[in-house]
Image: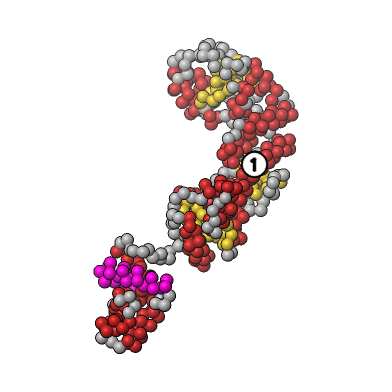
Amino acid sequence: MISALTVRDLTLDPSLETNVLAGTSGLGRSLDWAQTSEMPDPWRWLGEGELLMTMGLNFPAHPTEQCRYISKLNSSGVVAVTFGADGMQPPLSAEMLAEADRLSFPVLLTGENTPFVVIARLVAAANGNQQSRSILALSRIYQVAAAQEADQRRQGNWVHELFGVEASVVDTETGCVVIGTHIASQPHAKSHVLNTIRPATLQITHGHDLDALSLVHLKQVLTVDANAILQEALTDIASGEAAVTAQRRRQELDTRTASQRTLIPDGPYRILASPEKHHHRLVLGLALSKVAPLSMKMNGASLTMISTAELKQARTIYAELGIPAGLSSERLDPADLTGAASEAVNAMEVSLRTNNAWTEFEGERISLLARSRTEAREIVRSVLGPLAGTKPSVITLRDSLFLLLDNDLNWQLTSTQLSVHRQTLAYRIRRAEEITGHQLKKVSDLAELWLARQAWQMQGETSDEI
């Protein structure tokens, strides 16, 4: 049921031009009556549940007396005071406003174009019967809802401020919150179906019950807002999937999809991989949170391109939705998407095996030349493995391999310099290939072995024991 008119209700009605100066925490006080008075001691004539409306003709000028004035009103049961904006009262002191905040006693200012009689009649009408209060509440629903900016509509805080309930609109299929302060749905007490473009419900988590008339109109307003938010999110999802798919195929975006080009991150990015079964829930959660849903499904995984700047926010979204993710290394060129996707999928598989919610790719990527001794050591470790050890037999195999590489795979020259038969050299190279898992016949393996040779020289031909 709708409660009696409150001080807050007056401030939410734009036609009354009544604003809060102090005592905001007391705006929930109920109003039974509104009375004008220019007496120096109005608390003698006003009582419990009444609003004092005054031009301030006898309002004291000294801060101490102003504080006493507010304190006496509060102790007599007066719920608030509103001054006329004509400026007839002495300046309101900072001490008095602070005292009003301390007492949670609302101090208001009513505009010049609002006669006090208008407020008095509204309070009387609103408290005359339940039907009047319901009509007033319905008016406030549309007034307050229409005043919300786009991001405020997404949060939906105005519902709590107006009715004192925690409410959210939730997408039925995914559990993503369309309107509300969370990303994923929370436990709720009551659920009401909405007529939205995707199945959705209005969920009331706690607070006062709404009367039937208010609930009907609140559902209508939230349906309109939810449809607008969902439509924008679905458009973003479609554009994001088209953009990332085109990028993966290395196709130029034509004029029809030129707007998608701006969706690709301009700068460092990561690829996040999750099990495909979470795809629809994930992309809707990202879109509703205003993170570009550059996502697609591929080989049983849901892949999403996230700019490094949005990575922290994305991690929060994944965590609240309860979706595990594997994270690629940082990339700069969108053309690297395929390689980054492979890293992300590998990290996701580790995440699923270890039951971790968030796993970053830890594989080694070999650069053309090592940029530091630390990186050189990592290249040696990842390519040579046990062949970087210090046992004499291992050293012999490694030296033979390195000399063969230095001689551009000239077997005869290498065997001569080692003073061994060519078959002996061939045996040593086969053992080196078995130990490292790299074969000289494969171009990619040969390239990595050569890089490892350069890295070995960079670190001074010494190695920590593997």
Q: Position of residue 51 (x, y in %)?
A: 60, 21
Q: Residue at x 70, y 38 (%)?
A: 220
Quadrant that contains the C terminus: bottom left
In the displayed structure, would residue 204 be above or below residue 128? below
The residue that mark 1 highlights is 228
Q: The residue under label 1 is which amino acid type?
A: Ala
In the displayed structure, would residue 62 be above or below residue 229? above
User: Mostly what secondary structure, the magenta segment?
Assistant: helix
- Would you say residue 226 sits in the magenta stretch? no
Q: Residue at x 63, y 53 (%)?
A: 174
Q: Position of residue 402 (x, y in %)?
A: 31, 76
Q: Position of residue 371 (x, y in %)?
A: 32, 61
Asked whether 265 or 53 is in front, the reply is 265
The magenta stretch is 443-466
Q: Residue at x 72, y 44 (%)?
A: 195
In the displayed structure, would residue 36 be above or below residue 434? above
